């Protein structure tokens, strides 16, 4: 158990590892997506300019995998924690699947976007729900303005979403917990360094992350096995 006080403000950062037990591949481990794809070719503005079909095919493949996945006990434990702590919990995810929401989390901040949303690459029409997978024989979908419809994802070289809100919550937290993230992708990898020294810092995952030095506690194991006990009220 975490042993939280009645005034603790908890910031949770999740990464691909929280969804690994649901069957969604991580990025850097064995079988990780970046072992089989070059992110420059499928997840960057340059890739979108050069070969939007290839980009859509990559995200269609990921939409299919995420649509078939179910939340695991790690997601459910975090949803339960939100029920217990209400607005004293800030849940920030780098994941683009919807498994936190499927498990019952209501206030999830998706800093890298959402797989089941699309937006226009040209006008400022807001992102919209879109679970469609791209038919490789079809044209790239177009917006009314003539722009192309793209996945609502933060690609390499783009600025993550909701950073003002995230930095505010990071500044207020007394407990910071990262779960299933390798600690190499910025800006998320540096969040812990900002709170270290004034907040209790905890990592959960099967191996030590690259930024291990900044965590006071490291619980080694699968999120789905550790979190239900660790987060019990
Ligand atoms: P990574 O693939 O870099 O790291 C996944 C982490 O999850 C590793 O540290 C694993 O040890 C851990 N892990 C594996 N199985 C686990 C389990 N059952 N329980 C808990 N942890 C487990 O993924 P991220 O750190 O999330 O960005 O990657 C960060 C960003 O890099 C992603 O959001 C994505 C990627 O490129 C974009 O696409 C913009």
Image (cartoon, rainbow, N blue to C red):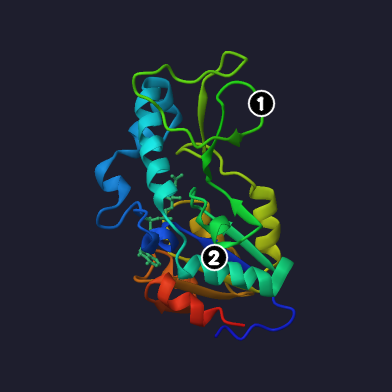
Answer whether residue 166 is visible to the viewer in this image.
yes
Separation of disc 1 and disc 2 at Cα? 33 Å
Q: Earlier in the sequence, mark 1 or mark 2?
A: 1
Within 8 Å of ligand 1, the CB of disc 1? no
In the picture, measured across the screen, residue 137 lies left or right of residue 18, that is left
Query: Which SS class for mark 2?
Result: helix
Answer whether residue 182 is visible to the viewer in this image.
no
Q: Residue, x 26% and y 47% (percent of image)? A: 35
Q: Residue, x 41% and y 54% (percent of image)? A: 69
Q: Position of residue 26 (x, y in %)?
A: 36, 54
Q: Nearer the viewer, mark 1 or mark 2?
A: 1
189 w.r.t. 44: above or below: below
User: For the N terminus, which image quadrant?
Assistant: bottom right
Closer to us: 125 or 133: 133
Q: Position of residue 205 (x, y in %)?
A: 40, 70
The image's mark for residue 124 is 1
């Amino acid at each position: 158990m975490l042993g939280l006080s009645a005034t603790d403000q908890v910031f949770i950062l999740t990464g691909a590892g929280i969804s690994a037990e649901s069957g969604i591949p991580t990025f850097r481990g064995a079988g990780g997506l970046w072992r089989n794809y070059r992110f420059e070719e499928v997840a960057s503005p340059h890739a979108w300019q050069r070969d939007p079909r290839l980009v859509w095919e990559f995200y269609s493949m990921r939409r299919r995998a995420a649509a078939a996945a179910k939340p695991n006990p790690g997601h459910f434990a975090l949803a339960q924690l939100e029920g217990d702590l209400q607005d004293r919990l800030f849940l920030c995810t780098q994941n683009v699947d919807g498994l936190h929401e499927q498990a019952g989390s209501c206030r999830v901040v998706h800093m890298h976007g959402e797989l089941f949303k699309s937006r226009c690459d040209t006008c400022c029409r807001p992102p919209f729900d879109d679970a469609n997978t791209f038919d490789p024989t079809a044209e790239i979908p177009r917006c009314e303005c003539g722009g192309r419809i793209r996945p609502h994802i933060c690609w390499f070289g783009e600025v993550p979403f909701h950073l003002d809100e995230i930095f505010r919550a990071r500044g207020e937290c007394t407990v910071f917990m990262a779960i299933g993230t390798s600690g190499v992708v910025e800006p998320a990898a540096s969040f812990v360094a900002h709170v270290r020294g004034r907040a209790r810092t905890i990592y959960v995952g099967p191996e030590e992350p690259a930024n291990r030095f900044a965590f006071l506690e490291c619980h080694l194991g699968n999120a789905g096995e550790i979190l239900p006990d660790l987060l019990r009220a």
